[in-house]
Image (spheres, rainbow, N blue to C red):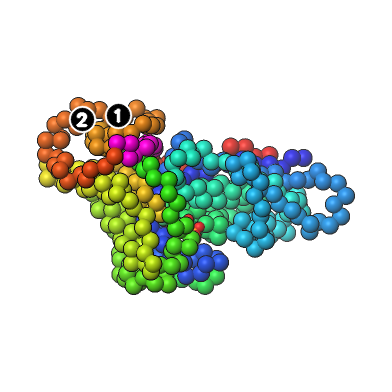
Amino acid sequence: PVYEATCTAPVNIAVVKYWGKRDTTLILPTNSSLSVTLSQDHLRSLTSARCITTTSNNSNANAVADRLWLNGHEEEIQQGGRTHRCLAELRQMRKDLESRDSSLPKLTDFALHIASENNFPTAAGLASSASGLSALIATISTLYALLPENGVSVSDLSRVARQGSGSACRSMFGGYVAWDMGTRDDGHDSVAVEVAPASHWPDLHALILVVSDKKKGTPSTAGMQRTVATSDLLKHRIDHVVPARMDRISTAIRNRDFDQFAIETMADSNQFHAVCLDTQPPIFYLNDVSRAVIQLVAELNRASVDAGKGYLAAYTYDAGPNAVLYVRERDVKLVLELVLRYFPQQTFDDPFHLGPEPAAASSFVQGFNAAVIPEHEVGAVARIIHTKVGDGPRVLSSD
Ligand code: DP6
């Protein structure tokens, strides 16, 4: 028989940022975080895995040599590395299952061959570790039947994904997802939980503004530990800001309160980048174009709030200069029109055909003060990817 599975998993973009570890091996964070899962119709990692049952004369069942290909290139699975630990954990879970049910095939005796690829445009500059690790865990857990009916929950799987990359645990769920930091030293309570499914608030769209600055910054894994070691502001954030913000933004999501959601999202992005600046030596992820986008969104919101219409958009930035704007469906045309007016660019992926629409903006711009947007080059935003909130990992096939 062939034992094989294929799954896809989504990208997630945090609105309350994870930045700092209290345990760098188990990947236990210094604060809880919360993210929105984006649709796999547009951005996803796809992973296939197969148990290599055909090898003959394999007298030593422990000589399991797993192999991994990422975007067509074989990667070494390092002993004791993150991928290795995730696979070891999943094998142990399968072994527990096999020992409870002797009718199950002994899949843990066999090596795994795993192939994974992302469909993101390379220029998108999106971190692929969250969707990649999440797709890996979803695929192996499908292959190993680590399912709710066998006593394994999605949060249990998120605990494994977390050890591959912290933010990956949140991609195990769709919709609106919290990662509870937990308090235990063994990490058992540091898991992802669903705050609300995508269907609860389906009209939240995301515009990813890809800034044409390809410079590589400080990798997040190294950067966050430098912050832990040197930033006083991080301590304040952990103790006095994030806990209450997690409550407020969860409430905003439950109430579909976009104004509150936008206020918390932008404040948290700002504080994350302030904490980076407070690091010694300082870390800069935003550039002039990022800052111009912040000023554009701030002015958009000011004009809209003054006109009694509430917030239009919320920006957030991860460890790089690209902006992600969260916008309600009804406001996408207007926001796009204004973004494209100030940041004319070449490539625009608009699967929803929601704009831009000059008419939507013409009445609005009267109250809008363009003078606050700093000068920037044409083409500073190279590409816009339009997507929206989406579901968790999908099983494409399983044999
Ligand atoms: C800024 O999850 O990539 O995107 O756990 O070391 O793999 P590791 O880090 P990673 O960090 C993500 C940082 C962030 C914020 C977030 O996604 O919450």
Q: Is residue 280 visible?
A: yes
Q: Position of residue 214 (x, y in %)?
A: 43, 45
Q: Position of residue 27 (x, y in %)?
A: 52, 64
Q: Residue at x 55, y 60 (%)?
A: 163
Between 163 and 149, the residue placed more toward the observer is 163
Q: In this rendering, would 323 be left or right of 342?
A: right
**Element under label 2?**
helix
Q: Residue at x 33, y 63 (%)?
A: 277
- Which disc is residue 355 wearing? 1
Three-letter amino acid code at the position of disc 2: Ala
Q: In this rendering, would 331 be left or right of 246?
A: left
Would you say residue 326 sits in the magenta stretch?
no
Would you say residue 384 sits in the magenta stretch?
yes
Q: Specify the principal SS of the magenta part.
A: strand
View quadrant of ligand 1: bottom left
Location of residue 346 (image quadrant)? top left
Q: Is residue 395 visible?
A: no
Residue identified by numbered label 2: 360
Q: Are marks 1 and 2 in contact (CB under 8 Å)?
A: yes
Location of residue 152 (image quadrant)? bottom right
**Element under label 1?**
loop
Label 1, residues with CA under 10 Å away: few <14, some 14-19, many ≥20? some
Q: Quadrant of the C terminus?
A: top right
